[in-house]
Amino acid sequence: MEQLEEGKTYAWCACGKSENQPWCNGAHAGSEFTPNVFTAEENKTAAMCMCKQTKNPPYCDGSHMSL
């Protein structure tokens, strides 16, 4: 679970290589992956996808249960 701050911009790692999961650290450089950049619309605690299989990026949708 991650605490998101209203108005703050985040870059969710889409490649899985970042050492700062679930956030991008630029490890995707040279690949076809790009981070999912978004601005939090409200202060909230959110489950961020760590398996990168979600159909609702960057949020966890339970897809890890079927891996």
Image: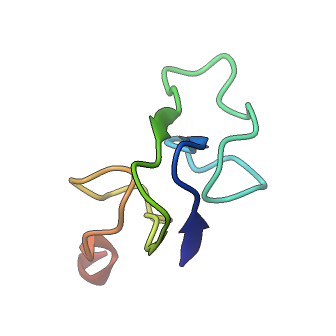
- Toward the viewer: 7 or 61? 7
Using residue 33 as the reference point, say whether residue 21 is left or right of it: right
Residue 44 sits above or below residue 59 on the image:
below
Q: Residue furthest top?
A: 30
Query: Could you tell me residue 32's position as x and y percent?
Result: 49, 20
How are the residues colored? rainbow
Query: Could you tell me residue 47's position as x and y percent?
Result: 43, 73
- Toward the viewer: 66 or 35? 35
Residue 29 sits above or below residue 64 on the image:
above
The quarter of the picture where the C terminus appears is: bottom left
Would you identify the image quadrant in which residue 15 lies? top right
Query: Could you tell me residue 14's position as x and y percent?
Result: 49, 42
Using residue 60 as the reference point, say whether residue 15 is left or right of it: right
Residue at point 65%, 30% (across, down): 28
Q: How many marks?
A: 0
Query: Could you tell me residue 31's position as x and y percent?
Result: 58, 21
Would you identify the image quadrant in which residue 59 lies? bottom left
Residue at point 78%, 54% (across, down): 19
The quarter of the picture where the N terminus appears is: bottom right
Residue at point 46%, 65% (across, down): 48
- Toward the viewer: 12 or 51? 12
